[in-house]
């Protein structure tokens, strides 16, 4: 415990051992084992220290893009590279590829081509190891053969696809072509065009003082050295409007975040005009990377790029950072761009060092007052925040005003409209040069505690200090001191806020493993609730056990469940007989969450993991755990009855059966219309006053609960007497043709009302 004034800046990136290295959001990766398409997206991870392999067991990769929010469970280990590859459901049978994790689109989601993405890598302790925040817009646009490659934490460049940093054709073994194939189909190849960038013109000295020489200064904006082989430099000669020819070919390299000065009489081979000129830098593809236009150059002054503007300065600064003129009487010459295609790139040099302003305190789960985000200016100078942005995973807020040197400034939720999550949140500060100045993440917030940087990590403190120095008070929020809300009426459970701790009693109705290996389900007040633990730390339980659970309530936009972290969270009280009462609800909604219901109608969609039942033009989704439920054979337009409990998952209301008898199907020959299906009054169950069903003896009701009007013209396939008749006399005998017609008419007349 003590006073803590935070000055240095730390982020999770300081401790990262694995990093996000390449992103292909456009697709069309030539994997050689399938036809390239827009589905072929991938994300590459890199281990900067291949000599130390790292286990990925328990690690996760979260992808938030467009409206999707997916978390992928990783496995195996990483020495140098691992690629998370997006595949379609039809590609599940593809053979495995070393260092490639095939992930179906259901789990991967989709990287939006226009809306960018937030990608976060977490280790098995839930700590954020690396993340990129391109929500709203990707840093650069790629084509069908390109992806984004990491140069530094702030710089990404466009280069050809290279998952695992090798040629894709070597991943999949291929049969060598025969000599006949080579003769008839000679192989021709054209090298892919490399995309260059990162070097700009930062200063020129066209009209030097008597003892000086002309020079052109280049600046490398990236974190790696850039080779200038085959780069070119040119100007526009006297009385001309087009570049001269031939132009100067460069050599050497520009160091990372460094300068290269080309001086007249040495490395500079072009002559700079005093009255009017343009200096143009071309990459090896002939693309203009940087262009500077000027006129009427003052003698002894250099033309330099400072804070988004080109200014004349009487003090040249070759091989050094450009600084503003020391006096106000500086000549600023307006420039009329020279008509040269393509349009010149306008370079921008960052003004602030990373960490000039940091996120110094988060208060996401208030016990009183408002949520807030606090910033700290660690420099001596006041900084204008115009153009800066503060964002979480869902919303961004544009800052304004000034934050004084060595001072704090907090922003409340009512001002920013940023609602910090109580679970899984990332907050980022971006300056007006689109640099990430500061970012931090947490997996779980604690009520009444704020999140502050302490030494080389972040911790929760009991002392909340908006607009003031942080004070670290040790968090004594143990399991024994947590405040628990006792749930007497399960209908009130949905009103409990996400992250609250609850006490609830209920009976085990679906033991561990019957639907999910990491979950079991309890029933209370005829509603079913999921109990989840990713590490499966459950006591031995069976159906009918009455249990008391003390644990955290998870109530998000995605789903609702009780989250336990130990077998000690679950207390076995007794064992009782379970009785349930399914309700007939034609069109369930959010208010039916947890209820046990029966839905009947016409089968509209039939897949391995999902059914859609239509009742009077209203659809009900039925979730199938295909490895647990063996359903009857059925096809579209069959009449289906399903019983289960209602859950709301990612906004979808769906029915979940948990044993085979809860799905029944009656095949038909002609399409059934749900308008022809009327509730029957003959069911014995409907006449049962208690209306209770034992889970061990129940035979769920099927089509016998319905009678179908004659106008629907439906003939059932399972007419037993008709089948026996056809089997006995044969349907292929010509001699019996007229008898079949006659007896068929008699049988149809006899049973048509029943049908």
Image: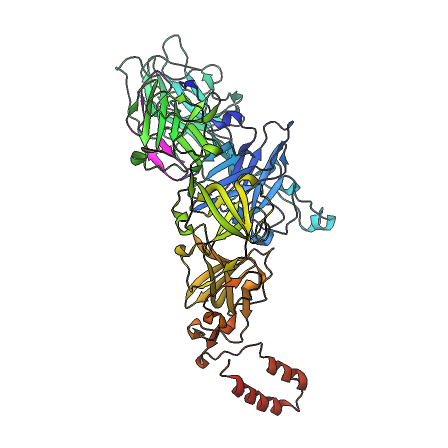
Q: Residue furthest left?
A: 329
Which residue is rendered at x = 29% and y = 36% of the image? 414
Image coordinates for residue 195, horizontal then vertical, percent: 51, 34
- Judge whether residue 391 is colored magenta: yes
Foreground: 261 or 383?
383
Q: Residue furthest right?
A: 179
| 565 in relation to 545, above or below | above
Q: Which quadrant of the figure has residue 211?
A: top left
Q: Is residue 99 left or right of residue 303?
A: right
Q: Residue furthest top?
A: 211
Image coordinates for residue 450, horizontal then vertical, percent: 40, 29
Q: Is residue 54 left or right of residue 227?
A: right
Q: What is the count of numbered marks?
A: 0
> Looking at the image, can residue 345 be seen?
no
> Looking at the image, can residue 494 be seen?
yes
Q: Quadrant of the N terminus?
A: top left
Display colour scheme:
rainbow
Which residue is rendered at x = 44% and y = 71% of the image? 674
Magenta span: chief secondary structure: loop
Image coordinates for residue 481, horizontal then vertical, percent: 45, 32
- The magenta-colored residue range is 379-401
- Judge whether residue 666 is colored magenta: no
């Amino acid at each position: 415990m003590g006073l803590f004034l935070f000055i240095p800046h730390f982020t999770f990136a300081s401790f990262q051992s694995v990093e996000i290295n390449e992103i292909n959001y456009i697709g069309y990766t030539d994997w050689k084992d399938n036809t390239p398409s827009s589905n072929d997206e991938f994300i590459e991870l890199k281990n900067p220290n291949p000599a130390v392999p790292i286990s990925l067991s328990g690690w996760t990769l979260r992808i938030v893009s467009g409206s999707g929010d997916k978390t992928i469970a990783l496995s195996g280990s990483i020495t140098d590279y691992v690629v998370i590859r997006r595949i379609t459901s039809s590609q599940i049978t593809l053979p495995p590829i070393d260092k490639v994790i095939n992930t179906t689109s259901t789990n991967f989601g989709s990287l939006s081509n226009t809306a960018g993405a937030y990608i976060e890598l977490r280790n098995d302790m839930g700590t954020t190891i690396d993340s990129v925040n391109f929500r709203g817009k990707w840093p650069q646009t790629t084509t069908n053969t390109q992806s984004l490659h990491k140069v530094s934490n702030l710089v990404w460049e466009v280069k050809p696809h290279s998952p695992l940093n090798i040629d894709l054709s070597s991943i999949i073994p291929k049969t060598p072509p025969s000599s006949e194939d080579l003769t008839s189909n000679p192989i021709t190849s054209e090298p892919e065009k490399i995309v260059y960038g990162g070097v700009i013109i930062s200063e020129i000295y066209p009209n030097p003082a008597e003892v000086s020489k002309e020079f052109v200064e280049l600046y490398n904006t990236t974190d790696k050295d850039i080779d200038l082989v085959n780069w070119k430099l040119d100007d526009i000669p006297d009385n001309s409007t087009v570049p001269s020819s031939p132009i100067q070919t460069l050599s050497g390299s520009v160091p990372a975040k460094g300068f290269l000065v080309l001086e007249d009489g040495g490395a500079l081979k072009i002559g700079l005009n005093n009255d009017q000129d343009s200096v143009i830098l071309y990459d090896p593809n002939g693309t203009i990377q940087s262009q500077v236009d000027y006129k009427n150059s003052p003698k002894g002054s250099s033309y330099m790029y400072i804070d988004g503007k080109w200014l004349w300065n009487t003090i040249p600064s070759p091989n050094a950072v450009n600084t503003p003129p020391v006096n106000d009487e500086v000549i600023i010459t307006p420039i009329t761009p020279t008509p040269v295609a393509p349009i010149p790139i306008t370079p921008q040099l960052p003004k602030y060092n990373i960490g000039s302003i940091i996120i110094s305190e988060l208060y996401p789960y208030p016990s009183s007052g408002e949520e807030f985000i606090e910033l700290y200016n660690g420099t001596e100078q006041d900084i204008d925040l115009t153009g800066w942005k503060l964002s979480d995973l869902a919303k961004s807020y544009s800052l304004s005003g000034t934050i004084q040197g060595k001072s704090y400034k907090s922003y409340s939720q009512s001002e920013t409209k940023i609602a910090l999550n109580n679970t899984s949140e990332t907050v980022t500060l971006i300056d007006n040069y689109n640099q990430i100045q500061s970012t931090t993440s947490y997996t779980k917030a604690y009520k009444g505690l704020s999140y502050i940087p302490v030494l080389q990590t972040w911790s929760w403190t009991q002392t909340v200090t908006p607009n003031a120095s942080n004070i670290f008070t040790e968090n004594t929020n143990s399991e024994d001191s947590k405040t628990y809300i006792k749930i007497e009426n399960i209908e009130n459970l949905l009103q409990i806020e996400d992250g609250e701790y609850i006490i609830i009693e209920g009976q085990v109705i679906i033991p561990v493993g019957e639907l999910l290996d990491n979950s079991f389900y309890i029933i209370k007040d005829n509603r079913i609730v999921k109990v989840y633990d990713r590490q499966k730390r459950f006591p031995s339980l069976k159906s009918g056990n009455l249990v008391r659970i003390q644990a955290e309530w998870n109530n998000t936009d995605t789903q609702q469940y009780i989250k336990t972290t130990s077998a000690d969270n679950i207390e076995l009280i007794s064992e009782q007989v379970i009785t349930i009462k399914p309700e007939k609800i034609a069109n369930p909604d959010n208010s039916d969450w947890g209820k046990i219901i029966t839905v009947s109608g016409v089968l509209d969609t039939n897949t391995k993991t999902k059914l859609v039942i239509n009742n009077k033009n209203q659809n009900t989704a039925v979730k199938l755990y295909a490895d647990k439920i063996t359903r009857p054979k059925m096809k579209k337009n069959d009449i289906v009855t399903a019983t289960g409990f209602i859950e709301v998952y990612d906004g979808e209301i769906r029915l979940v059966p948990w044993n085979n008898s809860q799905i029944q199907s009656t095949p038909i020959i002609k399409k059934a219309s749900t308008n022809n299906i009327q509730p029957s009054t003959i069911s014995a169950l409907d006449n049962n006053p208690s209306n209770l069903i034992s889970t061990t003896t129940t035979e769920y009701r099927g089509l016998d609960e319905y009678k179908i009007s004659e106008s629907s013209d439906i003939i059932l396939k399972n007419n037993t007497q008709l089948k026996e008749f056809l089997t006995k006399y044969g349907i292929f005998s010509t001699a019996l043709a007229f008898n079949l017609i006659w007896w068929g008419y008699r049988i149809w007349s006899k049973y048509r009302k029943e049908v």
